[in-house]
């Protein structure tokens, strides 16, 4: 038994739902004794560990509910990737001030340059800041809304898209939209205008979106609302995806 951690203390921590503090408590006790730490500093240290753990767990749960890919985080971005973008703008976006002001973001560029990665990485930052996030592909979103009309759940599905602090829509305007999809896109962009932020990734610039709508009038209205309130992050260069290909590590190679 570690000195100072009695069975009674373990029971008390479990009853208070603080049993995970036992993971770091022995080393914290040792450090406190060596440094002759005041009791209030020791308490702040061990409680800070627990706060950080709970914050991390809550962020992970929010990211999971948001359908964010665990590996798509800025800490795991390959800085050697041969892509170009406005680093100053990205640094500003990472502060999430654009969420506070309900601005949008269009991430535009050719196939494979990391548009989805950056969008999802910003989603992870938002989850760590206790923001609600939802990420989905445009095709998936339109199919869900179309099916929702059949069972009278359309309003509920639309509210899910409107209610979150940050909505990430991937591969927008990849294909020409039919009349129903155009109407849904117009409704979504109208409802989120200055009421919640969106990140849209697309292979086409906003100036090309008009031709992808079935209804030019709705298209002009929806696109104007979005572009008048959005930042544009253009990413160009070679495909980033080859850097995400699985590789055999050295140990696996030795075992063959």
Image (tube, helix red, strand yellow):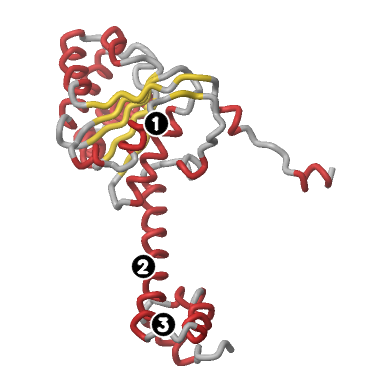
Residue underneath mark 3: 13
- Above or below residue 3? Residue 42 is above
Q: CA distance from mark 1 to mark 2?
A: 32 Å
Residue toward you, 115 or 169:
115
Residue underneath mark 1: 87
Identity of the residue drawn at 48% across and 83% down: 35
**Image quarter in which the C terminus is found:** top right
Q: CA distance from mark 3 to mark 2?
A: 15 Å
Q: Residue furthest front?
A: 35
Q: Nearer the viewer, mark 3 or mark 2?
A: 2
Q: How many marks?
A: 3
190 vs 207, left or right, is left
Q: Is residue 152 visible?
A: no
Few, some or many C-alpha atoms within 10 Å of disc 2 (few <14, some 14-19, many ≥20)?
Answer: few
Residue underneath mark 2: 51
Q: Secondary structure at mark 3?
A: helix
């Amino acid at each position: 038994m570690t000195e100072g951690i009695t069975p009674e203390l373990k029971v008390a921590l479990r009853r208070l739902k603080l049993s995970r503090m036992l993971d770091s408590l022995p080393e914290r006790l040792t450090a406190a004794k060596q440094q002759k730490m005041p009791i209030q500093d020791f308490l702040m240290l061990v409680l800070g560990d627990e706060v950080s753990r709970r914050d991390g767990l809550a962020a992970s749960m929010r990211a999971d509910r948001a359908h964010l890919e665990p590996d798509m985080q800025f800490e795991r971005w390959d800085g050697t990737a041969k892509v170009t973008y406005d680093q100053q703008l990205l640094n500003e976006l990472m502060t999430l001030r654009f969420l506070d002001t309900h601005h949008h973001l269009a991430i535009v560029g050719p196939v494979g340059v990391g548009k989805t990665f950056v969008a999802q990485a910003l989603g992870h930052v938002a989850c760590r800041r206790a923001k609600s996030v939802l990420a989905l592909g445009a095709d998936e979103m339109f199919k869900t809304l179309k099916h929702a009309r059949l069972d009278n759940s359309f309003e509920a599905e639309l509210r899910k898209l409107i209610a979150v602090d940050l909505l990430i829509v991937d591969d927008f305007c990849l294909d020409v939209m039919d009349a129903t999809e155009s109407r849904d896109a117009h409704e979504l962009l109208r409802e989120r205008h200055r009421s919640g932020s969106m990140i849209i990734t697309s292979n086409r610039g906003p100036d090309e979106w008009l031709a992808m709508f079935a209804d030019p009038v709705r298209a002009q209205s929806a696109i104007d609302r979005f572009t008048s309130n959005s930042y544009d992050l253009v990413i160009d260069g070679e495909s980033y995806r080859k850097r995400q290909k699985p590789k055999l590590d050295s140990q696996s190679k030795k075992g063959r």
